[in-house]
Image: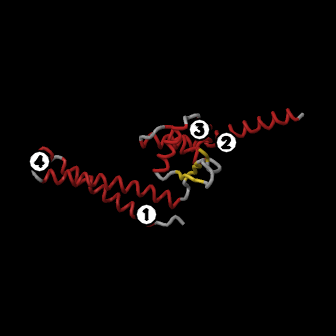
Amino acid sequence: MDNENTNADASNQDSNQNSNRDIRRHIVNACIHWARIKGYSDSAGFLRGLAISAKGPMSLDDLVQETGYSKSTVSSNMNLLENLGLVKRIVIPGDKRHLYAAIIDPEIIRTNMTDTITKEMQFFCEALNRTGSEILAGRDEGKYLLERIVSLRQSYELGKKTIDILKNQSLK
């Protein structure tokens, strides 16, 4: 009788795990799509999706077991996600394991998103300014770019204003 109960419990756990995977697949697929758009690996997206949809923090070993990826693949991708501000590493004193949890606070997410966009815009605007300066300094072969630079600069200025508005909005 105990063996039957053990088998039934194992079957229920397998069924629950499969059901949880089915429920989480939309989030995981969206995160894989995000990773592809950003030029990251599918594994980075998959791990981000798992972190978002997990009930709580997951250890590196849990993530390896869940994904089938190597420990080094999981570790490097979780470091990437942490550097992007999408997950946080939790260290418990006396425990050698690192736990990872998705960052889900709307204020932190908004700040991370707007900071990333702002940095990208600043980098591109600096390149536009340097290019424009060189063209105006007499390099005739690039004069056709001046119109584009003016147009792009206007677009980025509008984008900066939009980001500034987003940064100042309260989510509460």
Q: Position of residue 135 (x, y in %)?
A: 14, 50
Q: Which structural element holds mark 3?
A: helix
Apparent side of residue 163 relative to residue 1 in the rendered image (left or right) = left
> Is residue 86 depicted above or below 71 in this figure?
below
CA gap, disc 1 and disc 3: 36 Å
Q: Which structural element holds mark 2?
A: helix
Tell me whether the residue at label 2 lies in contact with that at label 3, contact meaning CB atoms closer than 8 angstroms: no
* Mark 2 / mark 1, whichever is N-terminal: 2
Q: Which residue is mark 4?
A: 139
Label 4 neighbour load within 10 Å: few <14, some 14-19, many 20+ = few
Q: Which residue is mark 3?
A: 64
Q: Which residue is mark 1?
A: 167
Q: Which residue is mark 2?
A: 20
Q: Residue at x 67, y 42 (%)?
A: 20
CA gap, disc 2 and disc 4: 61 Å
Q: Position of residue 23 (x, y in %)?
A: 64, 42
The residue most toward the front is 94
CA gap, disc 2 and disc 3: 17 Å
Type of the residue with mark 3: Val
Q: In the picture, residue 157 is in which quadrant? A: bottom left
